Each structure stands twice: as structure tokens, then as C-alpha cells.
Image: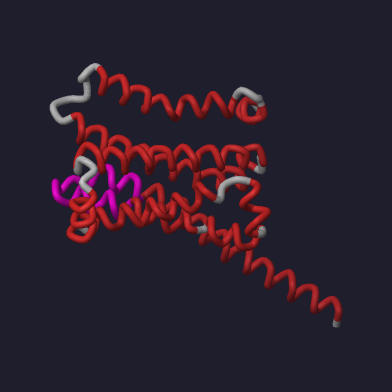
Amino acid sequence: MVVRSALRHAAFKPALGMLLLAPLAYLVWGAAMDALGPNPAETLIRSTGELALRGLCLALAVTPLRVMTGWPEWARLRRMLGLIAFTYAVLHLLCYGWLDMGFEWGEIARDIAKRPFILVGMLTFVILLALALTSFNAAIRRLGARKWQLLHRGVYAAAGLAVLHFFWMRAGKNNFGDVAVYGGILSALLGWRVWRFYTNRSNSKVSNADSRSRIR
């Protein structure tokens, strides 16, 4: 198949990475050329946040795609997608701290305590930071596969908190269109995992019951 052949090609992964980082190049160009509209700071903060959320959704889509297509090649994209999402999250935090708060750490601390959606955003970032720092093979060997897998299930919490952060941010403007889209995508991705977990458990029980009946 054409898609699977593309996934196997050595150039596919770097090409996809460049494509996903293209919006960053546009934002840098727009900031340099003063082409980001009347409020460039808000555009940068909002855009980097949405790009981080999109990256999380793409990273979470890898496993369903791998299972449904039966193509293990999808798995080689997971780490890159997660790190790109983290990159945009870092930029989102930097834009907030610099452009919105002027790196006034006392003001930032008060803002976190005063506004729940900022607190949720910070919690999301902390989880993503832990996942990014342990996304390499050396961390897997150090933690052990089981502990590493448990830690990296935190991506589900990060994605849920990211949508909540986005929801509360848009609540002030009563603009929930994009929130519904991301919430729907995330619900589908997490719902598929829940369905697969219970299906596998049910199949395992049936298999065990069959094995016991044969033994008898």
C-alpha cells in the first residue's frame, strides 16, 4: 500500500516533523514582520497552545492507527509526535510568561493561584515535562518497562487537563467551538482505549474459561 510504503521510507519521519513544525516557522515570520494581527502576543499564546493540543491528539492517535491497520510502522512516530507537542507546550508557556506577564515571577505565581485555568495549564506542563524527560531509551532502562509504561500513561491526564485548560480559557469569551472539536477527538481516542481494554479482558476471560474446560 502507498501509505504503508511511505511510513517505511526513511524520509517520512523527518518530513512529517518538518511539516508539523511549519506553523512555528510561520509564527516566527509573522512576529518578525508584524503580521500576526492587532494583538500578536495573544496570537502567539493561543496558537502555540492549540498546536500543543493538536500534537497531543496526534500522539494519542498512533496506537489506534497501529492496532486498526496492523502496521507497526506507526509506532516509530509516537516519540517524535510527543516531543513536538512538548515543544509547542514549552513555547506556549514561554509566550505566556514573557509576553503576558513580562517574566514577573511574583505576578505569575499570583496569576496561577487566582485563575484556575492557569493552574490547570501548569499542571499539564509538569506532566508533559516528566514525559519528555523520560521519553528516551536510557530512561526506559533506568525505570524499567513497567514503571515507564505507568508513568507515560500520564499522557491521558495531560490531554484531559489540556482540554480543560482550553475550555476555561475560552469560557471568558463564550467561544466553545474549537473546544468541542478537541474534546470530541480526545473522547474518541480515550474511549477507544477503554473499549479495547474491556474487550481484551473479556476475551481473556473467555480464553481462560475454554482452557479450564479442556483440562477438565
> Is residue 166 within the magenta segment?
yes
* Residue 199 in picture, x, y percent from top left: 59, 63
Closest to the observer, 15 or 24? 24
Q: Residue at x 50, y 55 (%)?
A: 192
| Extent of the magenta region | 163-183
**Relative to 125, residue 47 above or below:** above
Closest to the observer, 107 or 112? 107
Closest to the observer, 171 or 84? 84
* Residue 8 in picture, x, y percent from top left: 67, 29
Q: Main secondary structure of the magenta part?
A: helix
**Relative to 91, residue 190 above or below:** below
> Is residue 6 within the magenta segment?
no
**In the picture, residue 73 is in which quadrant?**
top right
Q: Is 58 positioned to the left or the right of 125 in the image?
A: right
* Residue 216 in picture, x, y percent from top left: 85, 83
Q: Residue at x 61, y 51 (%)?
A: 139
